[in-house]
Image (tube, helix red, strand yellow):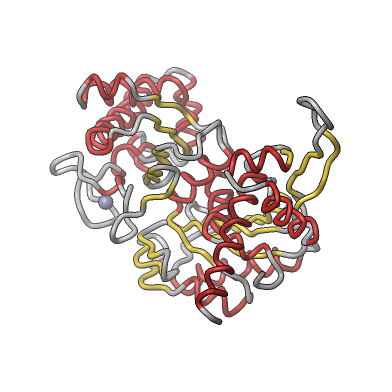
Amino acid sequence: MTTKKATHQLTKQHNRDLVLRTIFSHESISRAEVARVTHLTRTTVSDVVTGLLAEGLVEEIGRGESIGGKSPILLSIVADSRYLIGLNLAQDKFTGAIVNLRGEIKELVEIPVHDDNGENALHLVYQILDQLTRKKLKPIVGIGVGTPGLVNTREGVVINAVNLEWQDLPLSRLLKRKYKLPVLVVNDSQAAAIGEFVYGSDHAPDENLIVVNVIHGIGAGILINGRLFQGDGGGAGEIGHVVVQENGELCRCGQRGCLETVSSARAVVKKVKMSSLDEVFSSFNEGNSKTKAVVEKAGFYLGTSLSNLIGTLNIRKIVLTGDMTRFGVEWLNAVSAAMQTGAFSRMTEDTKLEIGKLNRACILGASAFLLLDNYSLLFNEDN
Ligand SMILES: [Zn+2]
């Protein structure tokens, strides 16, 4: 391809992605409004839209309100024209789903994980994907995986996932070879952050956002100017293994006193000597003072860690997700109080801390990340 032709191709693709992103972010929108938002000419927008209509990705859904002159035709994404697969490998069960272009979960498969690790855990992933790819929903255009641990997203390699005993596992390559689909692998908390950003409560496209996922383990996803920040080694937001207690309890990572050993769901269950978080939750609701104290302490240490994040990044919006959020406002208040006292008050006063309302943020985020990364996978051929 000549340079001139290549440049033309790139511009075309850039315009197409811009128009698609704009239509994606609206329930419905007219061509004129797309042109206004994207600063593209109306002719360019019309050309791109013609292509998207032909691909079946976008449809005309009637007329909008006229603002003088003819009322405009409204465009909308065809939610079920393509499907994505999202996986969450973070908990005591692996979950996979087929998700449409509006982030609606159409099929869900769950497999309990006992002491499965290494090769066994990988086979559970295959089992889920085998089941999902056999479903009638077609075409599936890609697989997004949210996995615990340190991940090199660019290479699609799980560098280290302690629980699963995965080290330098080329997950992306393995899945690509088996399922002949584009695959993206990302840390589960980072995936949850993208899920919250794309499908959660209103977030501006260029917003800064921290999403802290408190489950078995603890991790955060950091979005800067609307883009996931992964750090130099992919581990940005790995706050779970920052030491908060000198000579604290032994963590599964080998260190002592990590945030995970005091603030995670697993730590709380262990500290009150119960067998499940459900049991802890009942005891908490019955007003058991010991349980309450453990939950509040968990919140306290999490809040202290958040104040460090605020002191480092000065990001004003923090969303909490995961199992521990079920302890609601009492837990949130403990987190918030420690956060307020832990950092420069003018900074924490402006920080909005809230519990996320989105279900299955990790799965939704892992699948949405595929598209944010590359809209081309929605198209049959390279056009
Ligand atoms: Zn640790």
Residue 290 appears in the figure = no
Residue 11 appears in the figure = yes
Q: Position of residue 36 (x, y in %)?
A: 62, 38
Q: Position of residue 292 (x, y in %)?
A: 37, 23
Above or below 167: residue 49: above
Position of 211 compared to 26: left or right? left
Q: Residue at x 40, y 37 (%)?
A: 208
Furthest-left residue in this view: 246
Q: Residue at x 63, y 68 (%)?
A: 127
Above or below 292: residue 214: below
Residue 344 figure quarter: top left
Q: How many numbered dots are placed on residues in this image?
A: 0
Residue 69 figure quarter: top right
Position of 45 compared to 339: left or right? right
176 or 58, which lies in front? Answer: 58
Above or below 380: residue 194: above
Q: Residue at x 71, y 37 (%)?
A: 27
- Quadrant containing the N terminus is bottom right
Above or below 41: residue 294: above
Residue 260 figure quarter: top left
- Quadrant containing the C terminus is bottom right
Position of 267 compared to 146: left or right? left
307 or 120, which lies in front? Answer: 307
